[in-house]
Image: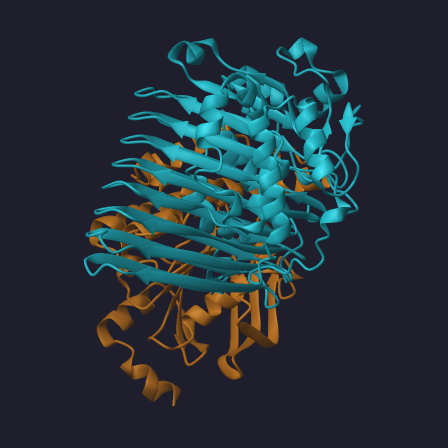
C-alpha cells in the first residue's frame, strides 16, 4: 500500500472575520493515528471543517498539503475524491434521501463512476452509479461488520437516528469510501460503551485494512482506550501547544486541561 | 433497480422532435361557430353534443378572462388550431397504427410499456386516440375505458348524464373553451364493486405546432369500486405557443376510491390551463397526485367536493418552476357533509427566475360538522431570484370543524450541502439529491417507472441550476 502524507502548515483560519486557528502545524502519514485533544472552544472542530473545505471557514494563511499538493483551492467533494474523510460530530439529517441511495451516490462519485459516465456522455439511467448488485453485496458485508440491520438502508439519512446510529453510519460511510486520511470529530460523543466499542473496532479494522492515516479529535480520553494513538497533540486556543506519545493522555486524564492555562499564559 | 427496464427512459431532449404525421383533417386557425360545427360533423356527433358545444362557445365568448393568477395577456385565442385529426379511422390493433405514429410511440417507449406493464393503454396523439386497447378481463367485469369520441358513440346516455355535471360549462372561461372544442380524452366507467388492480394509463402528447389540445376526461367509479388512472404528458418544443386546456370530471360514488395521477412535462411555450374536479359521495375517497414540471404557464387547482358523509379527499402536488416558468397551482377542498376530511400537500421548487404560487382553498359549509381539513405547503427556493408565494383561502362556516394550515419556505440548507459534498458528491449532484429528498413524499406515491422518470426529470431541471 502506498504511503501518503497530509501536512498542515502554519494554518490560520478565520470565521466571519474572527481568527480561530492561529498557526497549526501537523503532519500525518498513512498508517499513523494522531489524537488531537483539547478543551471545548479551542478550535478543534474548526480544524476538521477547514480540512474538509467548509465554505464558512476562511484560510487566511498557511497550507494544507496532500502528498505535497495543496488542497486549499479544492471544494469538499474534490477533497473527498482525493481521499479525505471527515466523520462528523453532528451529521445532519437529509429528509427523503435513503441511506442506500446516498451511499450508492457517494461511492459512485468517489470511485469515479459518476465522472466516467459524464465524460463518456452516457446519460443512460444509473450509468453514473456503481452497479447495484455488487454494491449491495459490499454494503451488506460492511453493515454486518458494524452490527447494523439491513433495514437501516431504507431509512432517511440521519433522520431520527440515535446518537449511536449516526456514528455507526459515519463509520459505514468511511468503510465504503475507503479514504487515505480520516478525521474523527468527537466520534465518542453520545455513544454508550457498547456502541463506542463497535465504532472503535470498526475504525481499527479499517485502519489496518486501508492503512489509514487517522486524526482523532476528542475532548475526552475515553475513545483513546479503544483507538490507541501513536501521537497525541494538545490543542489550545487555536494551536497545538504540546505533542507527545500516548502517555500525554494519562497526564490529561490526571490533571485535566486547567494546567494548560498557566503553562501557555 | 430491477424495474429499470420497465419503461424506456426519456428526457426533454429525446422528446424534442416532431414526427411527420399525415393529418387527415385540419380546420382553419382560430375559433368560431363554424369550427365547432365542422368538428362536431367530422366526428359524427349527435345533436345534443353539438348543442352542448355551441352553448359552451357562446359562454366562452361571454366570459371575461380571469384577473388573478398568472399573466395570460399574451394568450391569443385566434392563434391556435382547434382541431386536427391524424388518422381517419381509429386503429384498434397495433398493426393498424400508421408507421410514423408508431415511431413516435416507440420513441416514447409505449410499446415496451404495453408489453411489460400495461394491461390497457389509451394513447392520444394530438386530438384523437389512435391506439387504444383494453384488456379483455376488464371488459368481462364491465369496465369501460375508451376515448371520449368512442364513448359519445357507444355510451351516449352515460356521457350525456355526466358531462358538465362536475365541471359546468360556465365554471370558468377555460372550462367553457374546452366544452366547446374538446377532442379526445378518456372515458372510464367502473361498475359497482370492481377493483381495477392495474392502473389505467393514457399518454398525451401535443404534436402539431399551435395546436390547442382540449382533452375531456370523465371517470365514473361506481359504488365500492376502486381505480387508478394515470396521465403522463410530454410535448416537443415549438416556436409558437401551444394551448392545453383540459377538463377532468370524476365521480366517486359511495364507498368507492379513485386516484388520478398526472405528471406534466410540456415544453415551456405551452399554456397549461386545466380544470380537474371530483365529487365524492359517502365514504368515498379521492386522491389527486399531480406533478408539474413543464409548461410556461400553468394554472391548475385539482379539487375535491366532499358531498357525502365521511367522504375523504387528498391532493398531493409538486411543482418545479425553472427558467421563465410560472406555476399558479394549488388545490381546493369543499366540505359539504359531516365528518368529511381532506388533506392538501403541496411542494414547490423554484429555480432561476421561476415562480411558483400555491393557491389553496378550503371551504367548510355550515352543517359539515366534524369536518377536518389539513393544508401543508412547503416551498424550496434554489437561488435568490426564484420566487414562491402562498395564497391560502380558508372559509369555515361550521363551528364544529377543524382546519390546520402549515407553510414553510426554505432554501437549500448549507450544512446538508456540505455534508453531501464531503462524501464526494458535486454541488449539482448534492443539490439534486436534496431536491429529490424534498420531493420524496410525492415520488413514493408514484408507480415505479414514473418515479424513476420524475427523478430523471428533476435531475435535468437541476442541471446548471446551482449558483
* B341 left or right, relative to B76: left
The quadrant holding residue B183 is: top right
Query: Quick one: B376 or B226, which is closer to the camera?
Result: B226
x%, y% of residue B70?
Answer: 60, 59
Residue B93: x %, y % from top left: 62, 10
Q: Where residue B378 sits in the image (x, y, percent)? A: 43, 58
Is A38 drawn above or below residue B283 in the view shown? below
Where B448 sits versus A189, above or below?
A: above
Q: Nearer the viewer, residue A141 or B157?
A: B157
Identified at 29% across, 35% down, the residue is B284
**Res. A12 image quadrant:** bottom right
Nearest to the observer: residue B226 or residue B278: B278
Task: Name the quarter where the N terminus of chain A is drawn.
Answer: top right
- Position above or below: A213 against B57: below
Q: Percent x, y for residue B204?
A: 61, 32
Residue drawn where x is 59% and y is 68% of the image:
B384
- Farthest bottom residue? A265
Q: Report which colour depicts chain A.
A: orange
Chain corresponding to cyan in the figure: B
In-image side of A148 versus B433 (left or right): left
Residue B394 visible to an observer of this rendering: yes
B354 with respect to A34 (left or right): right
Q: Residue at x 50, y 37 (%)?
A: B248
Amino acid at each position: 500500500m502506498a504511503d501518503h502524507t497530509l501536512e498542515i502548515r502554519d494554518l490560520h483560519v478565520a470565521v466571519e472575520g474572527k481568527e480561530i486557528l492561529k498557526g497549526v502545524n501537523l503532519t500525518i502519514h498513512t498508517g499513523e493515528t494522531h489524537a488531537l485533544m483539547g478543551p471545548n472552544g479551542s478550535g478543534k472542530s474548526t480544524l476538521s471543517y477547514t480540512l474538509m473545505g467548509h465554505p464558512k471557514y476562511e484560510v487566511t494563511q498557511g497550507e494544507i498539503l496532500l502528498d505535497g499538493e495543496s488542497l486549499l483551492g479544492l471544494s469538499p467533494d474534490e477533497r473527498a475524491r482525493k481521499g479525505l474523510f471527515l466523520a462528523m460530530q453532528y451529521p445532519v439529517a437529509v429528509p427523503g434521501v435513503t441511506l442506500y441511495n446516498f451511499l450508492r451516490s457517494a461511492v459512485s462519485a468517489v470511485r469515479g463512476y459518476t465522472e466516467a459516465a459524464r465524460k463518456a456522455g452516457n446519460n443512460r439511467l444509473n450509468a453514473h452509479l456503481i452497479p447495484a448488485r455488487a454494491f449491495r453485496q459490499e454494503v451488506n458485508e460492511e453493515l454486518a461488520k458494524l452490527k447494523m440491520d439491513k433495514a437501516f438502508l431504507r431509512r432517511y439519512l440521519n433522520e431520527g437516528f440515535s446518537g449511536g446510529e449516526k456514528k455507526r453510519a459515519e463509520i459505514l460511510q468511511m468503510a465504503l469510501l475507503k479514504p487515505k486520511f480520516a478525521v474523527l470529530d468527537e466520534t465518542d460523543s453520545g455513544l454508550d460503551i457498547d456502541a463506542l466499542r463497535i465504532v472503535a473496532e470498526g475504525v481499527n479494522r479499517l485502519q489496518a485494512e486501508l492503512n489509514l492515516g487517522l486524526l482523532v479529535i476528542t475532548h475526552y480520553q475515553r475513545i483513546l482506550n479503544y483507538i490507541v494513538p501513536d501521537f497525541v497533540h494538545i490543542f489550545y486556543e487555536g494551536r497545538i501547544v504540546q505533542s507527545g506519545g500516548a502517555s500525554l493522555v494519562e497526564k490529561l486524564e490526571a490533571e485535566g486541561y486547567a494546567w494548560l492555562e498557566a503553562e501557555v499564559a | 433497480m430491477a424495474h429499470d427496464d420497465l419503461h424506456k427512459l426519456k428526457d426533454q431532449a429525446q422528446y424534442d422532435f416532431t414526427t411527420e404525421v399525415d393529418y387527415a383533417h385540419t380546420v382553419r386557425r382560430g375559433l368560431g361557430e363554424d369550427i365547432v360545427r365542422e368538428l362536431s360533423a367530422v366526428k359524427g356527433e349527435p345533436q345534443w353534443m353539438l348543442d352542448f358545444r355551441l352553448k359552451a362557445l357562446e359562454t366562452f365568448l361571454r366570459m371575461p378572462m380571469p384577473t388573478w393568477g398568472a399573466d395570460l395577456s399574451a394568450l391569443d385565442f385566434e392563434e391556435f388550431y382547434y382541431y386536427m385529426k391524424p388518422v381517419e379511422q381509429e386503429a384498434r390493433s397495433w398493426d393498424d397504427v400508421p408507421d410514423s405514429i408508431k415511431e413516435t410511440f416507440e420513441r416514447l417507449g409505449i410499446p415496451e410499456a404495453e408489453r411489460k406493464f400495461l394491461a390497457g393503454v389509451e394513447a392520444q396523439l394530438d386530438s384523437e386516440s389512435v391506439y387504444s386497447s383494453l384488456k379483455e378481463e376488464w371488459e368481462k367485469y364491465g369496465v369501460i375505458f375508451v376515448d371520449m369520441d368512442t364513448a359519445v358513440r357507444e355510451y351516449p346516455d352515460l356521457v350525456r348524464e355526466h358531462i358538465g355535471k362536475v365541471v359546468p360549462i360556465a365554471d370558468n372561461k377555460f372550462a367553457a373553451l374546452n366544452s366547446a372544442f374538446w377532442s379526445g380524452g378518456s372515458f372510464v366507467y367502473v361498475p359497482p364493486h370492481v377493483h381495477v388492480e392495474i392502473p389505467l394509463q393514457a399518454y398525451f402528447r401535443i404534436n402539431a405546432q399551435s395546436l390547442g389540445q382540449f382533452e375531456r376526461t370523465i371517470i365514473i367509479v361506481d359504488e365500492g369500486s376502486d381505480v387508478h388512472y394515470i396521465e403522463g404528458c410530454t410535448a416537443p418544443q415549438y416556436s409558437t405557443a401551444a394551448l392545453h386546456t383540459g377538463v377532468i370530471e370524476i365521480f366517486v360514488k359511495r364507498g368507492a376510491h379513485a386516484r388520478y395521477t398526472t405528471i406534466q412535462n410540456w415544453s415551456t411555450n405551452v399554456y397549461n390551463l386545466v380544470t380537474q374536479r371530483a365529487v365524492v359521495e359517502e365514504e368515498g375517497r379521492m386522491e389527486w397526485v399531480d406533478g408539474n414540471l413543464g409548461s410556461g404557464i400553468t394554472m391548475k387547482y385539482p379539487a375535491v367536493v366532499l358531498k357525502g358523509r365521511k367522504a375523504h379527499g387528498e391532493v398531493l402536488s409538486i411543482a418545479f418552476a425553472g427558467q421563465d416558468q410560472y406555476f399558479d397551482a394549488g388545490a381546493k377542498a369543499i366540505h359539504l357533509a359531516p365528518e368529511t376530511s381532506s388533506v392538501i400537500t403541496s411542494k414547490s421548487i423554484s429555480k432561476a427566475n421561476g415562480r411558483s404560487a400555491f393557491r389553496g382553498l378550503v371551504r367548510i359549509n355550515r352543517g359539515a360538522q366534524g369536518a377536518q381539513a389539513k393544508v401543508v405547503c412547503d416551498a424550496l427556493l434554489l437561488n435568490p431570484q426564484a420566487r414562491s408565494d402562498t395564497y391560502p383561502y380558508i372559509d369555515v362556516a361550521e363551528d364544529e370543524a377543524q382546519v390546520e394550515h402549515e407553510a414553510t419556505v426554505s432554501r437549500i440548507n448549507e450544512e446538508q450541502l456540505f455534508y453531501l459534498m464531503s462524501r464526494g458528491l458535486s454541488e449539482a449532484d448534492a443539490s439534486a439529491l436534496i431536491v429529490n429528498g424534498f420531493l420524496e413524499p410525492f415520488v413514493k406515491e408514484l408507480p415505479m417507472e414514473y418515479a424513476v422518470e420524475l427523478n430523471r426529470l428533476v435531475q435535468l431541471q437541476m442541471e446548471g441550476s446551482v449558483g
